[in-house]
Image: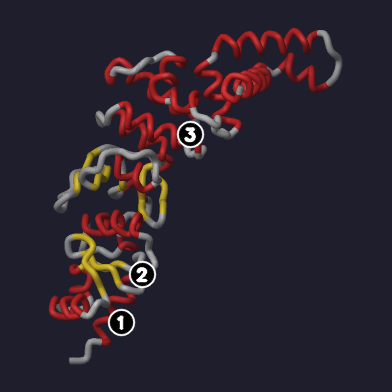
Amino acid sequence: MNWEPSFYELSTIAARQQGLVTAAQARRVEVSPDALDHFRKIGLISEIDSSVFQLVSSLADPIYAYPYAAWLALSPERYAWERAATPHEDAVLSHHSAAQLFRLGAPSPSNTVFTAPTEMEAPPATAIRVSPLAPHEVTTEGGVPVTTPHRTIVDLVCGGLSHDEVGGVMVSAVRRDLVDIRMLYADLAPFADRYAFPADGPGFVDHFLADLLTASPVPKLSPRNLRGLAELRFPDNVRETEDALRTLAADRIGSAFAVLAEDPDFAREIAAEVVGRKGLRG
């Protein structure tokens, strides 16, 4: 039997899907189960999810290939380019599966988790969480639609992951500047009573981010997270430093000092920078 036309059809589909193709997609182009079995036996394809195959020529890293295969398996007959044009309207990798994709911390392994706007049938070893997502809460990593690190951490907290594991994810995200700690705190603080963690800034930092304060050597943080961590952990020091800067500015002449006196946000950012460098870096 001439297998070349069948493999050509598979290759054409897989070229637009990270080197992957489903059995249902193969049927659409009249590639038989016998052909798939033949290609599998001779090593041209391998089954990496339920009826989802990866071509040997695929360059997809396993950390991306497996969740992408699980995403294809949610709607196996449709090609990837036939799915929703805006990712947040389709299933999106989320929770601990998203954290693993971003290499954030080491959350306990479980089923592959997706968040979808409506109920979907879940294949084996897959879980669907039904929840609306805003466009800004979804990104793409290695071709995989996935919740942003910010949304991922919020989901992990609200999903009941242990606080130690959440802390590991959060520390990694802050170190790599994948989240803005002030914005993350603002979104999580309203859930403090429900999920039993401190609502105040210093308590929040000590609960989830203590490793950032005790790490040796002290990690180099982005300016926004250095300032944000200082504001949360040392709010009194930031206020005192801000007042001192304003007093200094009132006694000086020049545009730089005028900005300190007139722009409260600028003065607060400078104060947080000073406290952050002193308090977090010694």
Q: Secondary structure at mark 2?
A: loop
Return the mark for residue 234. Answer: none
Tag 1: Cα neighbours inside 10 Å, few (<14), some, or many (≥20)?
few
* Residue beneath disc 2: 58
Instruction: Evaluate if marks 3 and 1 touch, with contact meaning CB atoms under 8 Å apart.
Output: no
Q: What's the mark number on residue 8? A: 1
Q: Amino acid at mark 2?
A: Ser
Instruction: Tell me: 11 left or right of 111.
Output: right
At horizontal 27% and vertical 87% (from top left) the residue drawn is 4
* Residue 47 at x, y percent in the picture: 21, 66
Name the residue carrying label 3.
Answer: 174
Query: Which quadrant holds the N terminus?
Result: bottom left
Amino acid tagged 3:
Val
Q: CA distance from mark 2 to mark 1?
A: 14 Å
Circle nearer the N terminus (2, 1): 1
| Mark sitting earlier along the chain (2/3) | 2
Could you tell me which residue is drawn at 67 percent across and 21 percent down? 270
Residue 184 occupies which quadrant of the picture? top left
How far across and down, in percent of the image, does residue 40 sit?
20, 75
Q: Nearer the viewer, residue 104 or 239?
A: 104
Instruction: Judge from the rendering whether residue 199 lies leftward or rightward of residue 243; answer left or right.
Output: left
Mark 3 nearby-residue class (10 Å; few <14, some 14–19, many ≥20): many
Mark 2 against mark 1, which lies toward the viewer? 2
| Amino acid type at mark 1 | Tyr
Residue, x 32% and y 76% (percent of image)?
11
